[in-house]
Image (cartoon, rainbow, N blue to C red):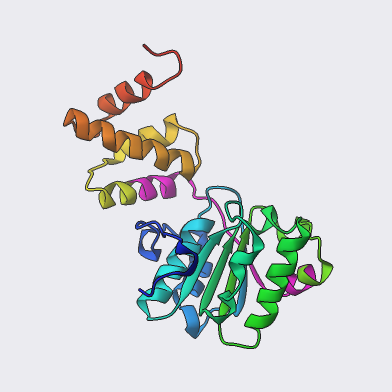
Amino acid sequence: MQQLPLRVRLRDTARFASYVRGRNAEVVSLLVDGARRSPRVLWLWGRAGSGKTHLLQAACAAAGERGGSATYLDLEAAAEPGWLEGCEALDLVCLDGLDRAVGDAAWCGAIFRLHTLMQDGSGRLYVTSTQPPSSVEFQLPDLRSRLLASSVHQLHELDEPGQVEALQLRAGQRGLDLSDEAAWYLVHRLPRDMHSLCSVLDRLDEASLAAQRRLTVPFLKGVLESQEPGAS
């Protein structure tokens, strides 16, 4: 993979193969096809935990594996709009969390400039938001009209069977054996969003390694109860 500008490090687990598609199969297929079929400007929106960041980073990784140049930028963590300078020359630019930045006039101007310059080349621009596009408030109306004309897709959260599948897939990537019984226990025991579930699974991985124990339901129950507020 070519080195990404802005020194943004992609998560090793953020690949299309590790994304459980559920009701998002159509948009994932669109992204997997990359330069062959994907629209020039793509807007993904959905609630936290629907996989927006995962898909953007997977798209960047896939572009790099094809020999292209790509960058991923979390707009909530980005220091200033100048970070976008030069990105128009890339094959793919992914901006995560659009609704956190477009209330700022400077960011609106920088994204508008990027969008304009990319139209003269062959690169693609992917953006995400938590809010539906019609609800995102822009400081720059021209940017709003341009992005609303892009290919817009909603991402849906996984249902319970999908969450079980995603947990088992993530566990397998970490070399863990998570049984159906244990995965269902976690889904029913924890907040039902993938951020919380994956975060707890990461902690359980550390606990199982330290204790040299398998992820059985009794072991999971003991670890989770010991980590609850007020537990001694």
Question: At x 61% / y 72%, what residue is drawn?
Answer: 85
Q: Is residue 207 above or below residue 10?
A: above
Assess whether residue 145 is covered by the magenta stretch: yes
Quarter assignment of residue 140: bottom right
Quarter assignment of residue 226: top left
Quarter of the image that includes the C terminus:
top left
Assess whether residue 166 is covered by the magenta stretch: yes
> Relative to residue 65, is residue 39 drawn left or right?
right
Question: At x 52% / y 62%, what residue is drawn?
Answer: 24
> Relative to residue 1, is residue 142 drawn left or right?
right
For this rendering, which residue is in front, 25 or 194?
194
Question: At x 44% / y 73%, what residue is drawn?
Answer: 32
Q: How many marks?
A: 0
Quarter of the image that includes the N terminus:
bottom left
Q: At which x and y percent is residue 108?
A: 74, 64
Quarter assignment of residue 62: bottom left
Q: Is residue 184 above or below residue 147?
A: above
For this rendering, which residue is in front, 14 or 3?
3
Q: At which x and y percent is residue 3?
A: 39, 71
Q: Is residue 202 above or below residue 84?
A: above
Q: At which x and y percent is residue 156?
A: 56, 55
Q: At which x and y percent is residue 183?
A: 34, 39
Q: Which residues are magenta?
A: 144-167
Question: At x 71% / y 62%, what residue is drawn?
Answer: 107
Outermost residue, left direction?
Answer: 212
Outermost residue, right direction?
Answer: 141
Q: Is residue 26 above or below residue 120?
A: above
